[in-house]
Amino acid sequence: MSEPQADSNPGATGGRLVDVVLDEASISRSTPEVEHDRAVAIYDLIEENSFQPVGHQPARFVLSLSLVEKKLVFRVKTEDDQEVVTHVLSLTPLRKIVKDYDLICESYYEAIRHATPSQIEAIDMGRRGVHNEGSAILMERLEGKIEVDMQTARRLFTLVYALHWKG
């Protein structure tokens, strides 16, 4: 029996996000670099993603992300504004990785201005590693609630990091 092939078009057989809304009360303006990362993450997420709330029919979903009482809120609706599910996740498992990611991003943005290309590359490799770790933790936190692939989790982690910037 052959192994199942990875779907080259995420969301083709399951649900997908068609819009992502960040709660304006949960975020504040930050550095131009973080604003750019946030905008790119939303754009990329909408362009290609795999997002399926467990126990619901595949559909085109709208995700609203917010922070409420230091908890991460995933509010999912269908494209035609029908409530699907709301999941509230503790930020505790993500707190250290977000802090680490924040520190390495500061180093990266500073390096872009003053470091050599090889130094920038080394810091960027570390940044991507921490980002992947945060994405894996987010996938674990969503397990049994919302099925996402790693690329979708990576982009969602970028948005979780953007929400973190409020503090």
Image (spheres, grey):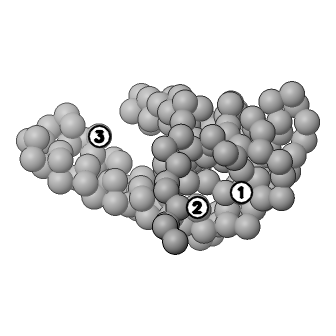
Total labels: the figure holds 3
Amino acid residing under circle 3:
Tyr
From this view, report whether residue 48 is shown above or below residue 132.
above
Q: Is residue 15 left or right of residue 55?
A: left
Figure check: 71 above or below 93: above
In the image, taking residue 110 as reference, residue 43 lies left or right, namely: right
Please give the label number shown on residue 146.
1
Sequence-wise first label, 1 or 2 = 2
Which residue does the image show at 69% across and 46% down from the upper left? Answer: 14
Q: What amino acid does circle 1 point to?
A: Ile
User: Residue at the location (67% across, 40% down)?
Assistant: 16
Mark 3 or mark 1, which has the lower sequence index? Answer: 3
Farthest residue, direction right = 82
Task: Tell me residue 20's x, y (percent).
Answer: 67, 34
Residue displayed at 34% across by 53% down: 128
- State which quadrant residue 76 falls in: top right
Q: Which residue is mark 3?
A: 109
Residue 163 image point, x, y percent: 60, 45
Question: Which amino acid lies under the numbered mark 2 shown in the image of this protein?
Answer: Leu
Residue 164 seen from this side: no
Res. 161 mark: none
Q: How dense is the environment of label 3, judged by Cα within 10 Å: few (below 14), some, or many (20 and up)? A: some
Point 26% across, 49% down: residue? 124
* Residue 102 position in % (x across, y down): 42, 53
